[in-house]
Amino acid sequence: MFDYTEEQEAIRRTAREFARKEVAPGVAERDAAARFDTQLFRRMGELGFIGMLMPEEVGGSDTDILSFSLVLEEIGKVDLALAWSLFASLSFAHPVATLGTPEQKALWMDTIVRPVLRGEANTAMGITEPDAGSDNARIRTRAVRDGDAWVINGSKTFITGAGLDICKGVVAVCLTDPEQFRFDHIFIPTGTPGYRIGPPLRKMGLHSSDTRELFFDDVRVPLNHRIGMEGQGLERTKSGFFTARILISSTCLGLAEECLTLATDWARQRVAFGKPITRYQYVQGLLTDMALNIELGRLIRDKAAHLAMQGKPFAKEASMCKWFVTEMAKDCADKAVQIFGGLGFMESCPVSRYYRDIRAATIGEGTTEIQRHVVAREMGLRS
Ligand SMILES: Cc1cc2nc3c(=O)[nH]c(=O)nc-3n(C[C@H](O)[C@H](O)[C@H](O)COP(=O)(O)OP(=O)(O)OC[C@H]3O[C@@H](n4cnc5c(N)ncnc54)[C@H](O)[C@@H]3O)c2cc1C
């Protein structure tokens, strides 16, 4: 129960080697230049990481969610922005490969799905709007049938990856039936007339990740661009969150572990008042708290992943995992900066980047407060 299989350990070693040898060398430069590295993304495709949760018949490896989580953890130790890009692209490829009609598969398998798996292309997921974040039932981007097309009007904000040169399009969650209050996922290819991508949004952290506002003015796409069952868009958005919560937690678990490693190494060598600072109980307390919480985070992540792999309900555990691990990682980054002292506040010190980057983790994929709501609901406290 507390060990990973040999195969999982082998996958983890491959990811660790990739992260240390190929991702780490340029991470500070990418952050400073706010540059997403498409070559690294392609390498993740070549190594088979992007296709890990995808069916074999489309070129994936249909691996278990825990193995994929270990890969995300290793990359998260080095570059949180790149780790997030790894699971974000599945938002289009996975539903098309698993739920797509034969017509959609014929249309997109070779043009988008397989290129995404190879790391040559990506797609974005457009849920959030200026007036609809946690409360996604307030989504007002409207898609109306007109002959053989959907006509889409509205906007999305804080959307990851939509502005990259390799981005093939966005899956926009649209209101399609205001009377029945139904929503659908509609794919809007990049370059469609009326689809405009705003300039990159400047952020506190995750600088090498692309984040944009998107605008739709009378955008027309064929009716077969609707993905999944009619009117089920909001339900699918919510159920997609369960797995995504385990995945995002894994990247943050990696970041927390790296904060502990860096802070411990530093504390052993930093001398104050004639002793290494590890000899002071207050500093020990910071490090031991980090170590304990990382252990707890790993246990809850692994449990949520095991439940998902066994096909058992895991909504409560996924939300507990997201809530605990992202808050814990934020706290670890804060403690690491404290242990590094003034150096921890300098941009040259990796923990200062971790401290900035992790701030988004308790907000994206459902805020901490929303995770608490889900847990309360799953405990039957809200009925
Ligand atoms: C770096 C980054 C990347 C992102 N990428 C994407 C993306 O690719 N696609 C996408 O669609 N979105 C993306 N988002 C948006 C993200 O999903 C939203 O920011 C998030 O869902 C929160 O919505 P909001 O910002 O509107 O905050 P709000 O929903 O307005 O929340 C504001 C505050 O109110 C609290 N709150 C809200 N409702 C309740 C309640 N019922 N009870 C208690 N507290 C409550 C929240 O917890 C929060 O503290 C990204 C965000 C970031 C920061």
Image (cartoon, helix red, strand yellow):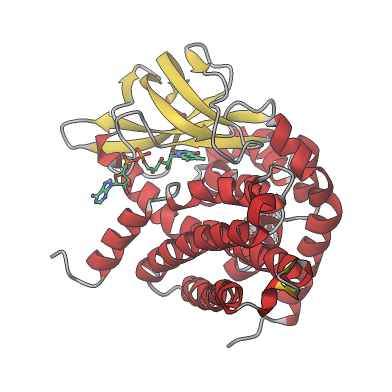
Position above or below: 340 against 104: below
Residue 240 sits above or below residue 104 on the image: below
* Left or right relative to 49: residue 335: left
Please report the residue visible at 75 percent of the width from the left and 55 percent of the height from the top: 48
Tell me which residue sits at (80%, 47%) in the image.
43
Q: Of all residues shown, which one is farthest toward the bottom?
A: 1
Q: In the image shown, does 321 or 155 lie closer to the viewer?
A: 321
Along the viewing direction, whichever of 35 and 195 lies nearer the viewer: 35
Q: Is residue 259 above or below residue 355?
A: below
Residue 228 placement (x, y as % from top left): 42, 44
Q: Is residue 225 rendered to the left or right of residue 134?
A: right
- Where, quadrant-wise, is the C terminus in this rendering? bottom left
Residue 166: % across, % down: 69, 29
Q: Which residue does the image show at 42% across and 48% down from the upper left?
A: 363
| Foreground residue among 300 and 270 | 270
Check the image and report above or below for 59 versus 152: below
Mark count: 0
Determine the residue positioned at 47% across, 58% down: 245
Quadrant (top left, top right, bottom left, bottom right) of the N terminus: bottom right
The answer to whether one can see residue 36 in this image is no
Residue 3, quarter of picture = bottom right
The residue furthest front is 273
State the image coordinates of residue 231 (x, y, percent, origin top left): 30, 40
Question: Is residue 128 at least partly visible in the picture?
Answer: yes
Task: Looking at this view, name the residue that lies furthest to the left.
Answer: 383
Q: Indicate left or right for 134 with 100 as reference.
A: left
Where's residue 346, x and y in %? Answer: 68, 44
Q: Quadrant of ligand 1?
A: top left
Q: Nearer the viewer, residue 25 or 69?
A: 25
